[in-house]
Image (cartoon, rainbow, N blue to C red):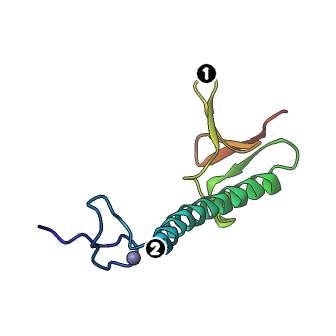
């Protein structure tokens, strides 16, 4: 039979068959680690979204403008992260970071827009 081990510290378990931890201390420490893992992950993504938002806001003070992909990239813009997507009836896709959005045009040009409240 396989020796069961505590999910937190890895010590062999001697209790009931459904036992997963040595004690509450190990259970709590395991759950805390799991929690902080996903919190750190969310923090990292929130940081990227905030940076994307501030790049768009800086480049688009008049609520509508065009810019180049290279300009966005130079500011550290990350095209993989956005909060929502909007497709117009004509098929143009807008990616939004909160209220700031962008759509790809031809020749590496981008249109920047601000969502109206
Ligand atoms: Zn343990």
Name the residue rendered at 74%, 58% in the picture. Answer: 55
Q: Is residue 81 above or below residue 93?
A: below
Q: Is mark 2 within 8 Å of ligand 1?
A: yes
Mark closest to the chain's N terminus, 2 or 1: 2
**Residue visible at 85% across and 33% down in the picture:** 117
The residue labelled by disc 2 is: 26
Pointer 2 local density, CA inside 10 Å: few below 14, some 14–19, many at least 20: some
Of residue 66 and residue 83, the one placed in the foreground of this image is 83
Q: CA distance from mark 2 to mark 1?
A: 57 Å
Tell me the residue at 38%/79% (across/down): 9
- Residue 99 place in picture, x, y as percent: 77, 42
Q: Give the left or right position of residue 42, taking residue 6 as reference.
A: right
Residue located beneath label 1 in the image:
90
Vertical order, 95 against 28 (above or below): above
In which quarter of the view is residue 105 placed?
top right
- Image coordinates of residue 96 in percent, x first then y, are 68, 42
Regarding mark 1 in the picture, which secondary structure is present there? loop
Q: Quadrant of the N terminus?
A: bottom left
| Direction from residue 12 to residue 83 in the image, left or right | right
- Horizontal and vertical percent position of residue 21: 38, 69
């Amino acid at each position: 039979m396989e020796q069961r081990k505590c999910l937190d510290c890895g010590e062999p378990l001697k209790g009931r068959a459904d036992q997963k931890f040595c004690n509450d201390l190990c259970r709590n420490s395991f759950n805390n680690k799991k929690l902080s893992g996903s919190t750190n992950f969310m923090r990292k993504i929130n940081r990227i979204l905030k940076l994307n938002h501030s790049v768009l806001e800086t480049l688009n003070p008049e609520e509508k403008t065009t810019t180049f992909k290279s300009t966005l990239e130079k500011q550290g813009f990350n095209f993989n992260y956005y909060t929502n997507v909007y497709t117009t009836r004509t098929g143009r896709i807008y990616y939004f970071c909160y209220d700031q959005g962008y759509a790809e045009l031809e020749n590496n040009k981008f249109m920047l827009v601000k969502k109206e409240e």
